[in-house]
Image: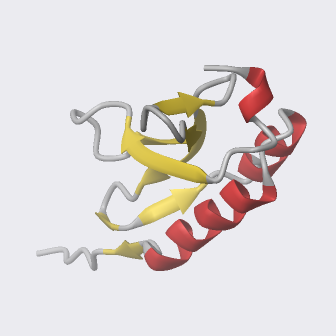
């Protein structure tokens, strides 16, 4: 990882930091692909907590301040747009709970 990647990052991959919690935090990993080796070179910091899984439903719930965290670290607008698109494509939908 390298801080010099932060403003050049044009790719991002996502994962949840654990599989045991229904509201597991969503991590975004900004990076570039090295042209000669094809290796991922991540930003520094390498990942950001940007949201979480919906506990009683499906989709992802963004954290209120996720964009500010990335901007503070000079992460590229390309990555920020890709994260916005991810949230748009994975809107939170809650299950309807019924009481017997």
Residue at the (49%, 35%) spot, across then down:
36
Q: Colour mode? A: secondary structure
Figure label count: 0
Residue at the far front: name it.
36
Q: 71 left or right of 91? A: right
User: Closest to the observer: 31 or 73?
Assistant: 31
Q: Residue 86 placed where, x, y %? A: 51, 67
Residue at the (76%, 44%) spot, across then down:
8
Where the N terminus falls, by quadrant? top right
Q: 84 left or right of 72? A: left
Q: In which quarter of the image is residue 73?
A: top right
Q: 84 left or right of 37? A: right
- Considering only vertical position in the picture, is 72 above or below 23? above
User: Closest to the observer: 15 or 51?
Assistant: 15
User: Closest to the observer: 52 or 29?
Assistant: 29
Where the C terminus falls, by quadrant? bottom left
Q: Residue 74 placed where, x, y %? A: 86, 39
Residue at the (36%, 73%) spot, across then down:
94
Q: Residue 76 placed where, x, y %? A: 78, 50
Q: Residue 39 placed where, x, y %? A: 44, 32
Q: Quadrant of residue 41?
A: top right
Residue at the (88%, 36%) spot, across then down:
72
Q: 38 left or right of 61? A: left
- Considering only vertical position in the picture, is 53 above or below 4? below
């Amino acid at each position: 990882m390298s801080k010099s990647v932060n403003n050049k990052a044009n790719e991002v991959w996502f994962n949840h930091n654990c599989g045991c919690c229904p509201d597991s935090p969503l991590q975004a990993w900004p990076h570039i692909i090295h042209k000669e080796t094809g290796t991922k070179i991540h930003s520094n910091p390498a990942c950001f907590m940007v949201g979480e899984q919906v506990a009683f439903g499906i989709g992802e719930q963004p954290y209120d301040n996720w964009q500010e965290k990335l901007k503070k670290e000079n992460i590229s607008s390309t990555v920020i747009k890709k994260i916005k698109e991810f949230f748009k494509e994975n809107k939170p939908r809650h299950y309807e709970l019924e009481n017997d």
